[in-house]
Amino acid sequence: MDQHHQQSQPAIVIIGSGLAGFTVVREIRKLDKAVSITLITREPGYFYSKPMLSTALASKKESSQLISTSSENMATQLEITIMGNTDVLSIDTDAQTVSTSEGELAYGKLVMALGADQIRIPLHGNAAQEVMTVNDLEDYAKFRKAIEGKKKIAILGAGLIGCEFANDLVQGSYEVDVIDLAPQALGRLIPESAAIELQSKLSDAGVHWHFSTTVQAIEREDDALQITLTNGEKISSDVVLSAVGLRPRLDLAKNAGLATAAGIQVNRHLETSADHVYAIGDCAEVEGLILPYVMPIMQAARALARVHDFMDRLADKIDQKRHRIRWGRS
């Protein structure tokens, strides 16, 4: 890469240290070793596989054991600056600046890889606030501590995450109840015949299913949680875990004036409604679709890296052509 190209490249700022954020960095680095990249995250900046959060309980892994690479090593390996434990307060798309808890940062291009939050359904009862969610390593550590010495776990949601937790927990010798308003497990992902087979396998392992109903109230009675379902059934549990789905994080984008619907709206180039601002991963809505899965995120990261590389090289060629014209060269 020539010196002119290196100097003309604008800095890239990425918000979010999940799979989407770090994969974008890796894909850009395959094409461009020189561009300045700063990654901002409210977590420390380490890397871990988020799917492990719902599959590591049976092996009794502590949260620290799920970290594959420290923030220091990520920064060194990828040659980036990581602003860990930092909150992004606002984005000014006109000035192309990001305001953070550590100060203001300018960007040439901004990638929003904000992720999503667990949906919390409204519940009644004096123990409604005791329902737990697992969406990051800190949540995982709290959940592991909560189930130590316990026997019964109730899971709200029979989607992919709910079923993964159910399988992992029964493998760890817990009694598991799974509750879902749908008539089957993985209702949005697999046909009824496949769902029946899955439910049978997990039933044999010890999972109890409660379909076509949902939770009405959760009351604490001594050391147990008493769950009342809308069909009148009652379940006793030690801990309740909610895994009913994810909601894209939109507040930052909305406050910046970006177009949002179910997610941050982007086109097939992952461009938002603001120039030089992109969105990827669980927070992004790509032409009406939200694709919160590993393969779509990795493919999107590769595409976004190529968009960055192509646009910068195109700008560089234009600058060089203008330079030749200015000095009377063809």
Image (cartoon, helix red, strand yellow):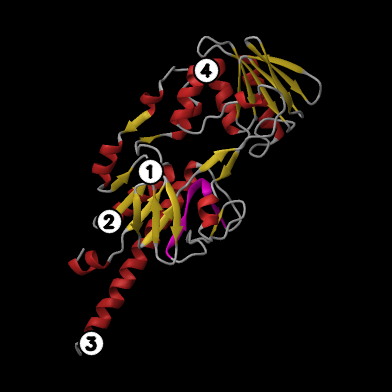
Query: Going 39% across and 50% down the picture, which residue do you hit?
Result: 100
The amino acid marked with disc number 1 is Thr
The residue at which mark 2 appears reads as 36
Give the number of the mark in front: 3 or 4: 4
Dot 1 or dot 3: first in sequence order is 1
**What is the distance, in whole Å, between disc 3 and disc 4 at their CAs?**
70 Å
**What is the distance, in whole Å, between disc 4 and disc 2 at their CAs?**
42 Å
The amino acid marked with disc number 3 is Arg
Q: Is 315 left or right of 242, judged from the image as shown?
A: left
In the rendered image, the quadrant that contains the N terminus is bottom left
The amino acid marked with disc number 4 is Ala
The residue at which mark 3 appears reads as 326
The residue at which mark 4 appears reads as 146
Dot 2 or dot 3: first in sequence order is 2
Q: CB under 8 Å between callouts 3 and 4?
A: no
The amino acid marked with disc number 2 is Ser
Q: Position of residue 273 (x, y in %)?
A: 52, 64
Q: Is 298 left or right of 36, judged from the image as shown?
A: right
**What is the distance, in whole Å, between disc 2 and disc 3 at their CAs?**
29 Å
